Amino acid sequence: MDIYLVDLIQTCIYMMKIQTLSFSNYKAFLTEQTVVIKPITLLIGKNSSGKSSIAKLFTLLENSLSGIYEEPLMLSNNDVSLGGEFRDLVYNRQPSVPVNFSLGFDDAHYLNVSVLSTTAEYELKILKWEYISPKFTLKLSYSPSTGYTDSKGIRYTCSFKGFVPQELKTDDGTDLLHHISADLRLDVDYIGPFRILPDRQFHLIGKMVYDKLGVKGEYAYPILGVSEYMNDDLHHKVGAWYKEHFNGWELKINSKNRPYLEVFLSKDDAEINIVDVGQGMNQALPLVVRANISNPNSIIVLEQPELHLHPAAHADLAELFARSAKNYQQSFIIETHAENFILRIRKLIIDNDFGLTEDDVVIYWVDDAENEGQELLEITIDKEGGLSNWPEGVFNENLDEILEIKNALKRKRSQSNDI
């Protein structure tokens, strides 16, 4: 998939849209957990509960479905690391137990895959592979003695790149590869919690096409430079958003010394290079850039987008992402600790002024399971902004602090009266 900055992002490879993702024996999750992919999917929970493992999983599966890499699972995916060896992916780091993934796409297409580490410590093998579609279904299992066989014991000659079969034949030579859709892919743009601090100047290197913004949002700046050079709308949209939400400071591109460019903030007669302002304004830039780019069916994974921002800006980002999801038909997977983020989403559902409904949002609380590992609690928002299954005590910290202040004040007044 290539991103071209010509008015809006365009994608040149058709992909089915992913609807659900299930996994088991993965990282902190022993039993099967399912994430329904909505335009806005929020991951909340305590620190080290497993939210990041879910967020990063999308980058892993993107490469597994690309048909490019030999290995079923890559531990480093587009600079997103999931560990140093296969056991780091597996619950309790037991490589002798398979890790399992199930993906549901639109048009009733499903792919279920189990991956196991063989006796050779670093060799991974697809242990089970199941493809389901309205017109064709095939379930294969692997054993060292028989190779791949279906449920009837028929042997198959198979080879894979990632999860994608490159050869799929029965013992009699019948080729079944044409039955497998080539459209089961993911297009993931992952931006981590710590975005890159920009240089005072950057320069265009002749590259006009970017497929991602980068884990640290590092390509946001050259993308804006290309936008300004091509005179498309992207840099104007980003600048206008800054002006509206950052107290009148409009973001602009200074290209007088091209190919050297500057990003600066302008208000009245004042101009300030973005490196000279608070971190919140430059940390937000990659997020605002990505939200103003259209790439239908893509998945934008954001970890803690609220970092370094004032609480009021948390809500503004939530609205920006929701509008982007609806206007550009793309999905946001957002790991957040920001209460204001969820509050704004609830308000947007009530207002429904740009079409965001209760069916467009789902929240997952990641917590300890009753037996072992972690589990997901699905929380929905109704059309009146009400929450289902809200865990007790979550985001009650502000109320608790207010109560503590009141109690402290009562104690102080009581002590004063006793004197």
Image: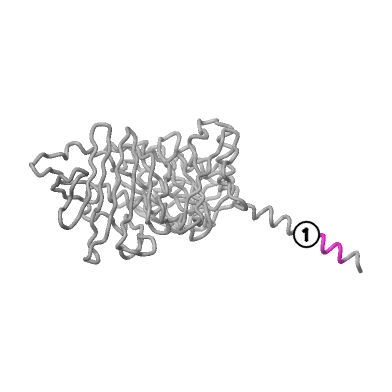
- Point 37% across, 56% down: residue: 25
The secondary structure that most of the magenta stretch takes on is helix
Residue 8: percent from the left, percent from the top? 37, 37
Would residue 222 be counted in the magenta stretch? no
Which of the pair 204/78 is nearer the observer?
78
Instruction: Give me the residue at 14% from left, 47% from top.
Output: 155
Disc 1 marks a residue whose amino acid type is: Asn
Residue tagged 1: 407
- Above or below, 216 against 246 in this view is below
Q: Position of residue 314 (x, y in %)?
A: 56, 48
Q: Nearer the viewer, residue 150 or 203?
A: 150
- Label 1 SS: helix
Magenta region: which residues? 406-415
Work out whether residue 23 can be spotted.
yes
Residue 363 percent coordinates (x, y): 51, 45
Color style of the picture: one colour
* Up-down relation of residue 98 to residue 14 (above or below): below
- Where the N terminus falls, by quadrant? top left
Q: Looking at the image, which is closer to me, 279 or 258?
A: 279
- Report the side of 416 relative to 163 (left or right): right
